[in-house]
Amino acid sequence: MQTLRILKLALLALAALGTAQAANETKRKGDFTDHIGEDPQPLQTGTMQWPEAEFAEASVRGRAFKPGEKFTFNAHWGIFRKAGQMVIETEIMQREDGEKLLIKTETASKGFIRTLYPMTLQAETLIDTDHWRMDTNTVNGKTRSTLSETKTTFDYNAGAMNYFDANNPEKCGTKPLPYPYPLDYAGALLQARGWDLKEGESYPLLISSKGKFYFIEMAISGKEEINTRFGRMEALRIEPVNAYPQSRIFREGGKFAMWISADSKRIPLRFDLSTSIGTASMRLRDYQLQGEVLVARK
């Protein structure tokens, strides 16, 4: 039973790192949400005092968003090396309201673990290519018998976010935008590749997830050589230095870290989430950069 519980937590950690939508699966004390849940409060109010922040100009925020890219990550948890998979890919969409970048994210349990804990989540995010921020985000999927069906839209003229959750109507509603540049988790990961990435400097993000906002400041904590499926690579380690409100995913003190290759390609190689019961790790298996495809060694 303990092994099954650890497997369950591992797959929920995978979902949190990928789309952060599976936390509704369980609310029991001592279970997943006590370890890696987001804001413990069920709702955020419109009276929150957000810190002052200066975001980079659009040319900097958007330079890492490129169509035709694909990143496939394997989920690791302890001795389990194929607990699940996350795929992030991008493409250009021509719409009546202009050109958009579509980010598609699919997170799923795999192999033997899927027989114990079936989970598949798909997210689609449309990015405005003028301001490089979210227009809409939809998440659909299933974790065991629990369905996920949410849609988030943004009205920038009104400075508001509209959130719809088919399975949790009490969470539906409109709330003011604290900053005008929201992203989902996948979008934040991609945007980080385009930062100047100078050691000691911090970079602000506004994450929108499950009808809530999280202001995160990320900073380069150093340069390291790490083992990857492509061999030893020099990478920049990026960690949160400020999080508001308190977020159990993005936490200070080494609880969350991501590694981006230190070369000109700025490839997202790995990101880890440490908890009291172990570390959930997403590690790059293969990738495609605008036509260039690299598959890791077996």
Image (tube, rainbow, N blue to C red):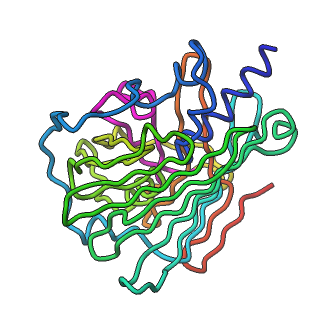
Percent x, y of residue 106: 64, 56
Q: Front-most of 143 and 15?
A: 143
Which residue is farthest left?
Answer: 52
Q: Name above or below for residue 205 compared with residue 76.
A: below
Give yes or no for residue 238 being in the magenta stretch.
yes
Considering the image in quadrants, where does the N terminus appear?
A: top right
**Left or right: where does residue 16 sit relative to residue 11?**
left
The residue shown at (31%, 34%) is: 44
**Left or right: where does residue 226 sit relative to residue 238?**
right
Give yes or no for residue 41 being in the magenta stretch.
no
Percent x, y of residue 213: 33, 42
Q: Quadrant of residue 226?
A: top right
Query: Which residues, given as a range, are shown in magenta?
Result: 233-260
**Left or right: where does residue 203 sit relative to residue 43?**
left
Q: Name above or below for residue 84 compared with residue 294.
A: above
Q: Quadrant of residue 134?
A: bottom left
Q: Front-most of 292 and 264?
A: 292
The residue shown at (49%, 81%) is: 93
Q: Name above or below for residue 226 compared with residue 293.
A: above
**Which SS type dominates the magenta stretch?**
strand
The residue shown at (55%, 77%) is: 68
How many marks do you count on the picture? 0
Percent x, y of residue 161: 31, 54
Considering the image in quadrants, where does the C terminus appear?
A: bottom right
Percent x, y of residue 159: 20, 58
Q: Quadrant of residue 156?
A: bottom left
